[in-house]
Image (cartoon, helix red, strand yellow):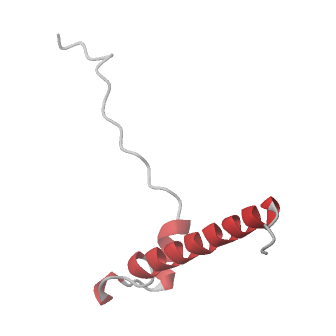
Amino acid sequence: MTRPRPPRASLALTITLALIVKVLILSLLWKAFFSAPPTKKMRLPTSVVEQHLLSPPAPIPTLPSKAHDDSH
C-alpha cells in the first residue's frame, strides 16, 4: 500500500523543478548569445568603453526655428 504524498510536497517539488528548468534554459541562452563576442574585431579595451560611457553627453544639434522666419 502506497501512501499519498501531501499536496504541499507535490507543489514544492513542482516549483523546484520548474525553477531548475528555467535556470538551465537561461544558462543555455546566455552561453549561446552572450558569453563571447562573435568576432575578435568586436572587442574593445576597457578604457575606451569607460571613456565612452562616462564622458558627458555631446550637445544635441538643433535646427533653426521657422517661427521667426519673415521670408514669406
The residue nearer to you, when weighing 1 against 14, is 1
Q: In this view, does 4 lie to the left or right of 54?
A: right
Q: Quadrant of the N terminus?
A: bottom right
* Residue 22 picture location, percent across and down: 56, 69
Disc tally is 0
Corner quadrant of residue 15: bottom right
Q: In which quarter of the image is the C terminus?
A: top left
* Residue 64 picture location, percent across and down: 31, 30
Q: Which residue is drawn at 24% across and 12% down?
A: 70
Q: In this view, does 45 lie to the left or right of 21?
A: left
State whether residue 50 appears in this view.
Answer: no
Q: Which residue is drawn at 72% across and 70% down?
A: 13
Corner quadrant of residue 38: bottom left
Residue at the extreme bottom of the image, as rendered:
40
Residue at the extreme left of the image, as rendered:
72
Q: In this view, does 66 lie to the left or right of 16?
A: left
Vertical comparison of 44 with 60: above or below: below
* Residue 4 picture location, percent across and down: 79, 67
* Residue 9 picture location, percent across and down: 79, 67
Vertical comparison of 70 with 13: above or below: above
State whether residue 13 appears in this view.
Answer: yes
Q: Is residue 8 left or right of residue 28?
A: right
Residue at the extreme front of the image, as rendered:
1
Q: Which residue is drawn at 46% across and 79% down?
A: 28
The residue nearer to you, when weighing 48 against 16, is 16
Q: Which residue is drawn at 47% across and 76% down?
A: 30
